[in-house]
Amino acid sequence: MAGLNHHAAGLADLEAFRFADEEAFLTAARERFKGVFLLQTCNRIEVLVHGTAGDLADFLHDLGREKFEVREGGDVLRHLLQVATGIDSMIIGEDQILGQMKRAWAASQAAGTSDHVIDLCIKKAVHVGVEVRKRTKINRGAVSIGSAAVALAEELFTSLKGRHILVIGSGEMGMLVAQALAAKDLTAIYVANRTYERAVVLAEKIGGKAVNFGELKRYITLSDVVITCTSAPHPVITRRFLADAMKGRCWPLDGHPRPLVVIDIAQPRDVEEDAGEVDGVNLYTIDNLRDVNEHTLASRKAEATRAHDYIESELDHFLTMLNAASADDALRGLYTWAEAIRVRERDRACARLQGGDAQTAAIIDDLTRVLAKKLLLDATYSIRACAEQGQTREAEWLVKAITRGDGLCFRKDD
């Protein structure tokens, strides 16, 4: 597993590592790995592969990515469970990550990159994520990135009562922002989206006003706060655009415009980085939400500890399941070898029974099939037992000893 997240990377690093075309990334990765899973959220990018850490690092380097963290072995499993339970999120205990993992999994399956090992890993992670939320109060009153943005705005103004707020973006994040705002005593909530019909749907849900994207400048002029969270691959608000909008916020004879708070929680960014230099504009990004997380974490330390304990208790079971799955490839080779021999000898026997009828051929086929299965029963048990104990090399040696006559290479102390 390799990637970056909010713990060690700022927005610039995340943007540099992000893959704009996820389908193209999965297609390229499919040529190098047995299985691939790509998770991209506003504050993390994680690449999970069924392969080696070295190959993954080389692959990312080939794609021009230089700064990232690599995990392997049991550390990958632990990290997956921490991500799914929300204890690794910027907003501790948030529930949004589970939906994001499921959608990323569906994308991997659609691209044909989610093999049985990837499927097992993500299925287990989601299951543990759900269980932790049932067993603890880690998501009790939890906030999302969207509601954290609203909390930041409220902190900056002391109160949002009587304020005008513009939300740009009506996707999942926009919905979370709008729902958090609906609980405040606002004078007006404006919702803008490139697809006007989607803005109308969200505005109706929260009692706000839908805004056509062409009227964006006018409603920026009217608003006290702008929270933007589109999925656009490039900035939708440039410095020049914002500077023009701020001209409409100047009172007659006043040299400076009324202050405007802009909170950009999109990834990639919706607002050009230097837009914060425009007179009167106070620009905040995801990096500014870390203080909200610290407050959240302080109030949930006990629940986070319980979640950690549950994760550790599940790791051994997770590892056993994964090791057992790794035996499937070895066993597949064993049974392919046995089936080839069975079919060859069945056909020879049928050829010797000149004039044999279909019933005789069916009996011989059943007999050879049962014999092959029973002869491999103990070997199958031993190979799977080795794999479950993490002895994957030993499992491979057993298969090679049976199919190729290789000597067993166990260590003297085994």
Image (cartoon, rainbow, N blue to C red):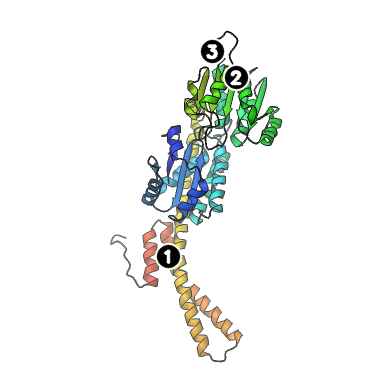
Disc nearest the viewer among 3 and 2 = 3
Q: Is residue 410 left or right of residue 235?
A: left
Residue that numbered label 3 is attached to: 256
Secondary structure of the residue carrying tag 1 is helix
Q: How many residues crowd mark 2 within 10 Å: few (<14), some (14–19), many (20+)?
A: many
Q: Residue furthest left?
A: 412
Give the amino acid type for the residue marked by disc 2 in the picture. Asp
Give the amino acid type for the residue marked by disc 3 in the picture. His
Residue 318 image point, x, y percent: 47, 50
Residue that numbered label 1 is attached to: 382
Can the viewer see residue 142?
no
For marks 3 and 2, the one nearer the N-term is: 2
Along the viewing direction, whichever of 413 and 272 lies nearer the viewer: 272
Q: Are marks 1 and 3 in contact (CB under 8 Å)?
A: no
Q: CA distance from mark 2 to mark 1?
A: 69 Å
Q: How many residues crowd mark 3 within 10 Å: few (<14), some (14–19), many (20+)?
A: some
Residue 202 image point, x, y percent: 67, 33
Q: Name the disc covering residue 96, or none.
A: none
Residue that numbered label 2 is attached to: 224
Give the amino acid type for the residue marked by disc 1 in the picture. Ser
Disc nearest the viewer among 1 and 3 = 3
For marks 1 and 3, the one nearer the N-term is: 3
Q: Is residue 210 left or right of residue 320?
A: right
